[in-house]
Image: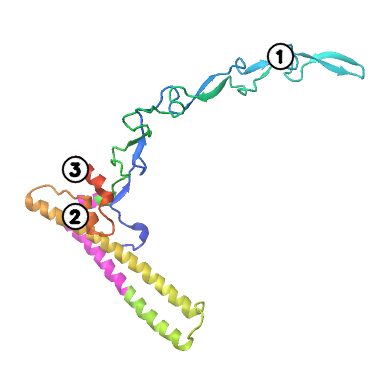
Amino acid sequence: MTTSANHRMTLQDSCPDCDGQGALPCTSCSCARCDAGGKIIVPCSACQDGQCGCRLCAGSGQAMAKKGWFSRQAGTCTACQGKGRTRCEVCNGASGVERVCPECAGAGCHALCQECNATRKAECAMCFGSGHVESDQLRTFRSMAIEGLRGESEKRQREIHHLETKISRLRREHKVLWEEWQQYLGDAPDESMYGVYCDRMLSEIAEFDQDADRFKAEIAIIETVIRQKVEAERSGQNATVQLSDLAVAVGGFGAAPFAAETARTSRA
């Protein structure tokens, strides 16, 4: 079994419906006129179909051009290429301009929506606003038989023993190295080889300690699931594993974040 922190077991996963936000866009209050965008397109008052009469030739397509020093003659208008019309400068040829929606005053939603109180966000029905759902790993444990769970717990206990052996060895080696450093180098700077090796050992010890704590937390979760399954078997009922119980079992997780999922389990 790997001891990498990247393979940590979690009680919860991010809610797939709301991407962990706990809320979804409210569909009850969206303004139908602007499609919740707050803006609408109205016809441009300065043109027709995005085109205006050419100012240079007054819409004729012909303009007087200089010929020689003292004469002028009519020719194709260079501004409109003889078409008599140019692109509207107000709407940039779009024939429509953007304006604030008069129905929602640019908010994109109706201020009196009872579903979201005009926040445009409705509570996610999947996670009940918490942004989290029960993790796949926890669901897997809940579906396992008691013997299988005990096997998972024993695997982690072996990993803890292996890690504690490594930690004990590293601490002994660190003590010896530290004593040699003080004896032979005294106040030598930390950049010496002794300092580098001591820092490396302390870093490895801290990493192994974290992995051991993680396995202990996982064992606490597994043992709690086992206990609740045993109690359910004795009472002849189906086992119902509450996330709040699991949170208490591992201490530092805290029970509060799992209240929404516990409510979801009880409603199901």
Tell me the residue at 20%/52% (across/down).
Answer: 144
| Location of residue 185 with respect to 23 vertically, above or below | below
Disc number at residue 84?
A: 1
Which secondary structure, mark 3? helix
On the image, the x and y values in percent for residue 70 come to 92, 17
Disc number at residue 266?
A: 3
Closer to us: 228 or 93: 93
* Front position among marks 2 and 3: 3
Tell me the residue at 33%/68% (across/down).
Answer: 209
* Front position among marks 1 and 2: 1
Closer to us: 176 or 90: 90
* Snapshot quadrant of residue 155: bottom left
Label 2 vs 3, first from the N-terminus: 2
Amino acid at circle 2 = Val
Q: Is residue 156 magenta?
A: yes
Which secondary structure, mark 1? loop
Left or right of 166 in this view: 48 = right
Closer to us: 264 or 230: 264
Quadrant of the image for the N terminus? bottom left
On the image, the x and y values in percent for residue 93 come to 62, 21
Q: Mark 2 — residue? A: 225
* Snapshot quadrant of residue 120: top left
Label 1 vs 2, first from the N-terminus: 1
Please name the colour scheme applied to the rendered image.
rainbow
Disc number at residue 94?
A: none
Magenta stretch: give its range. 139-165
Tell me the residue at 85%/13% (across/down).
Answer: 73
Tell me the residue at 47%/24% (across/down).
Answer: 101
Left or right of 206 in this view: 218 = left
